[in-house]
Each structure stands twice: as structure tokens, then as C-alpha cells.
Amino acid sequence: MARRLDGLFILVFLVAGGNVAYGQTFAPAVPQLRDPLGQIALPAWQSAVKDRLFDGPTPFSSAAPVGFNANFDLPPATLNDWRNNTYFGSAPDWHVPQGGLQSSGSIAPSNPPPPALKSTKSQGIRWGKVLLQSFEFISIEHGLRMAFDPPSRRAMAKAIENHEFWQAYVRSLKTLRGWSDGNHFFVNYVGHPFQGMVSGYILIHNDPKGKDLRFGRQKAYWISRAKAMAFAAAYSTYWELGFPLSEAAIGNLGPEGRPGLGAVDLVITPTVGTAYLVTEDVIDQYVIRAIERKWCRPGVSAVARSVLTINHAFSNLLRWKSPWYRDSRGGLRSCGN
């Protein structure tokens, strides 16, 4: 008896749905049943009947469906199921796209939402900050030169007094020859590579693709450090030969028996400096992290990071961050993470 009642209700529903489909083609639709595009929207319960009986969610349309398969093997239902409209479940949400009906005359299902647009924010090197921090660095270097190198102060004062700043700069450039520049081993092979490290870190800290990379075999890490070496070479060349903020211009090297210019600084500063930079990355990765894991205290982390990687710490100051700041991990309480 229950199955006969099921069949009777299904027949009634089909007839009602057919009337709506017929009215969509030939009869004027009730205004409140029209969607913004003027198409008839089926009630939810009729859509549920359709999805239950036919294979696939093919909406009713003015054209008769072709090749559908009916499924009348329905489970038994109670009277409350019919009253509460829960027998067929919830109907899918159909709408007509702005392009109108499909060629078959059926209403198309809603299109999936478009993928979220990626951020248009540039992921390239922030050259403005690179140049600003480089200016800070070179100003500190020349400030120390003027403070602790009396011959440079006298040469600079003489050039300004005689209005021959440019002439003194050209005379210094003419002393560039050979490998050695007359400085001591420590200056050429320790001091200048430290300059290369700091200038390399300036680029790394302003490169979104490289600032948070840890030492390892990954290709991105070594590409980042190669770019840092290239920038260190450019910075070193300007420091030695540029105008007006260079050793040749402000230091007036060469005249009066003073050391001249040589190729040693142009080569050693970026190459050995980058080797030292990678060494500090190794120390940070394996030594400092081990110390932080064993002694998870902010004071220990601050001292270890600031002393064992001193050039990284100094380059942090140029971007107005604490010496122990790290892009690749958390603060002093990260305990090596």
C-alpha cells in the first residue's frame, strides 16, 4: 500500500512539474516566480523529485529530455517525510548564467567561483631599501675613516681648501695598478671581506626570495648568495673607485707616499666576503641553534646570535632591527626553531 501511495504522489509531482515546464514555453509565468533573467525557477521540492528520479542533474527545460533513465525504486517513506519535505533531501542551487541558456535549452548549474587572484605585490628586491642601507653603511665607514685616519683628514681638508677635490680624485685613480695596494694582510683579507659580508647581507635582507633561507643544498639558497656576491662586488667597486663617496675621492689615496689602489680589494672583498657570509650561515644553522636548544634562554640566544654572527648582527642594525633578529625563525624564545 505504501508503494502505491508513493507512486501516486510521484505522478502528481511529475504532472505539476510538467505544467511548469509547459508554462515556461507557452504560458505567461507568474511574475514572482521569475528570476532576474526572466527564466522560470523550479521550486525546491520539484527539483528534488527530478534529481531523485533521473540520472544526472539535468534541469527541466522547454525541450523534452532525451535518453533519461527513470528510477522508481524508492525507499518507503512516512507521512512526516512528505509533510516536512525531507524525503528527497535538499535540492541543488540552479541559476541561469549571464550568457543565457545553453544550446540545449537547459538551465546551466552555477559556475565555480573564480580562483582568488594572487597578490600583485612585487616579490622582487627592494632596491630603495638596499640603496638607503648602503648609504648608511658607507657613511659609517667614512665617518670612522675621518675619525681614526689623520692622513685622510689632512688630504681631504687640503683638497677642499685648494678647490681641487676632483683633481685629487683623478690623481688617486691613476695609482690603480697591480694586485697589492700596500695595506696589511689583516686589512685586505679580513677587514675588506667583512665589508663584503655586510653589503651582501644588505641585499639578502631586502630580497623576499632569499632573506628567510637557511643554509642547505637547495638551489634557491645558493642563487640568493650568488646575488649577494654580485652586489658586494658592485659595492666594493664603488667604495674603491666611485665618486664622490669612495676611498679615491674622500681618502685621496696614493699621493704623498700613501698606499695607492690595487686589484686585491676589488677581488677579495666580494669573493672571500661571500665565503665568510656562508660560514656565518653555517654557524647560525648548526652552532647557534644547538646552543639555543640546550639553553633556551633569551639572554643566551641574544649573545650567541650577536657575537658568533657579528656581521649579520651589524647588518640588522642598518635596517633598524635588533642585532639578534632572524628572518628564518622566531625571536629569542624560539629555542632553536
Image (spheres, rainbow, N blue to C red):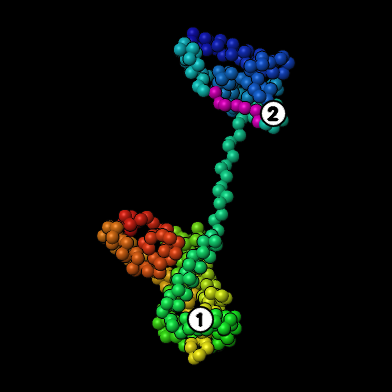
Residue 333 visible, this angle: yes
Furthest-bottom residue in view?
257
Side of 10 relative to 197 (left or right): right
**Residue 63: numbered disc:** none
Which residue in the protein does label 2 denote? 101
Helix, strand or loop at disc 1? Answer: helix
Magenta-highlighted residues:
91-97
Q: How crowded is mark 2: few (under 14 residues within 10 Å), some or many (20 or more)?
A: some
Q: Residue furthest top?
A: 1
Q: What residue type is labelled 2?
A: Leu
- Badge 1 vs badge 2, beta-carbon distance below 8 Å: no
Indicate yes or no whether the magenta region holds residue 93: yes
**Residue 40 position by quadrant:** top right
Q: Which residue is drawn at 43% across and 66% down?
A: 315
Q: Which of 309 and 191 is in front in this view?
A: 191
Question: Where is 89 relative to 151, above or below?
Answer: above
Identity of the residue drawn at 59% across and 11% down: 12
N-terminal label among 1 and 2:
2
Q: Can residue 233 be seen by looking at this rendering? A: no
**In the image, residue 292 above or below residue 161:** above
Residue 295 left/right relative to 317: left
Query: Picture coordinates of residue 85 (x, y %)?
Result: 50, 16
In the picture, the disc for residue 157 is: 1
Which residue sits furthest right?
A: 26
- Give the answer, above or below, for where 53 lies relative to 205: above
Residue 275 pos. (x, y %): 44, 73
